Amino acid sequence: MLKEQFDRLKHRDTLGIPSEEIVDFHGNFAKKFRFAVPIHARNLAQMIHPYWGYLSHFPNRHFRFEELMEVYENQIAASFERTLGRDLLADELSCLAFWNVNYSSKSSLNWSEMQTLLTAFRFKIQTEDQF
């Protein structure tokens, strides 16, 4: 059902949903269907909460369905660790999920790539000196 909702709302030119529409995408789905997501509330908030919602703050980014599913799978793993009391590991896995959204094949970033990631995490850092 989530895939059908995604297909209705995706942009035809990018075959994805713009990051700024991710919260609305999930909200529209939740209005129509009741579902239980095995993701801890904190991890879910980091993904799609109107304030935290890191997925909704990647600048100029369109998410394909497969990318969203990868984030969900990683957040489920992070949530499992959180329920076992391993909060530090859960936070690290959650961060890894957001890293993999854009940079799965990289082990380090240049400044412009780092700025994109910092923007997604809601940091307003413009220069390397501020960092």
Image (cartoon, rainbow, N blue to C red):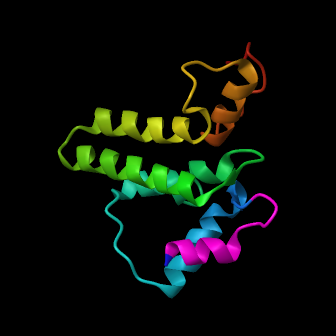
Compare residues 8 and 124 and report the one nearer the observer: 8
Q: Does the magenta stretch include residue 12?
A: yes
Q: Secondary structure of the magenta portion, mostly?
A: helix
Q: Does the magenta stretch include residue 130?
A: no
Q: Is residue 4 placed above or below 62 in the rendered structure?
A: below
For the view shown, which residue lies furthest in the bottom direction? Answer: 32
Q: Residue 32: x percent and y percent? A: 52, 86
Please report the residue visible at 38 percent of the width from the left and 77 percent of the height from the top.
35
Q: Residue 55: x percent and y percent? A: 59, 51
Q: Residue 116: x percent and y percent? A: 70, 34
Please report the residue visible at 53 percent of the width from the left and 59 percent of the height from the top.
49
Q: Quadrant of residue 34?
A: bottom left
Please report the residue visible at 36 percent of the width from the left and 67 percent of the height from the top.
37
Q: Is residue 47 placed above or below 107 in the rendered structure?
A: below
Q: Residue 59: x percent and y percent? A: 75, 44
Compare residues 74 and 12 and report the one nearer the observer: 12
For the view shown, which residue lies furthest in the top direction? Answer: 129
Span of residues in magenta: 2-14
Q: Quadrant of the C terminus?
A: top right
Q: Is residue 104 placed above or below 101 in the rendered structure?
A: above
Q: Quadrant of residue 13?
A: bottom right
